[in-house]
Amino acid sequence: MKVIQANCRVQFTSEDVRWVIDTLSKNDKDSASLASLLQDPDSLDVLLDDERLLQALLEDHSCLRVSQHFYFYVMVRHVLRRSGLDDRRVADYVAELLAEFSLTERTRCRLPGSDVSLDYFFEMLAALQTVDDRTAFCLRTQIGNQSLFMSGLFLERIRHRAETRGFPDLSYYEQLGQANFRVAGDHRLARRYSLDGIFHTLSEQFEAARKALNDLAERVLFLGDARFASIRPSASD
């Protein structure tokens, strides 16, 4: 199982930077100034918070010029800030989570040496009783990630299935996500990967992060954004 890192920003492409320049500049002089600023990571972070970038992504539904990592980071960063989560590393992590989970295969949870996918939370929780320490950490992060992903992007699906078919409701996802992010954040591997602070924040602020993703899903799914159309719910609910 892959451990998702808070590394969305380092995967931006030269085309992403060019798009920022083209979107924010009004003339050649602006372009030159922006090109200089964007060479500095701190300046880039500030420019990425510009509301004009968000609006441009929302208005151009294809956005074929930007990478998936750039797209998700800008979107996630803005909705998290509005929910009071201003830590860029948290945005970096959640954006990378969406980029990874936009590929259906990446949502699959398989134990080392096994081709069988654990498709349900109860299977992952049961596996925690028998796996080694590293695999337990990976399972905890998978459960936290999947809880946030599902409750953030598929809220109405969760509610509908809970009301009509007796499936777990929203509180189940929130409690599961909070608990597993908290335990994962206390693990030695979280410190090694510099994820401990991120996991603790997501545990403590799970509801705020979930609501931010609800807002994001409503915006882009309503607009028919192709990049979100590729995201599908897993069977774990």
Image: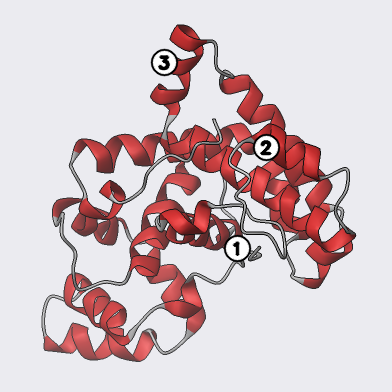
| Residue 48, above or below 163 | below
Badge 2 element: helix
Give the colouring mode of the picture.
secondary structure
Closer to the N terminus: mark 2 or mark 1? 1
Query: How many angstroms separate mark 2 from mark 1 (CA)?
Result: 18 Å
Horizontal and vertical percent position of residue 72: 39, 59
Query: How many angstroms separate mark 3 from mark 1 (CA)?
Result: 33 Å
The residue lying at 30 percent from left, 81 percent from top is 17
Do labels 2 and 3 touch, CB within 8 Å? no
Write down the residue under mark 1.
Answer: 89
Badge 3 element: helix
Which numbered disc, 3 or 1, marks the residue closer to the eye?
Answer: 3
| Residue 137, above or below 229 | below
Q: Crowding at label 2, few (<14), some or many (≥20) Cα neighbours within 10 Å?
A: many
The residue lying at 31 percent from left, 34 percent from top is 218
Label drawn at residue 160: 3
Q: Position of 218 compared to 167: left or right? A: left
The residue lying at 81 percent from left, 72 percent from top is 192
Closer to the N terminus: mark 2 or mark 3? 3
Write down the residue under mark 2.
Answer: 177
Q: Crowding at label 3, few (<14), some or many (≥20) Cα neighbours within 10 Å?
A: few
Q: Position of 25 compared to 136: left or right? A: left
Q: Position of 225 compared to 68: left or right? A: left
Horizontal and vertical percent position of residue 55: 22, 53
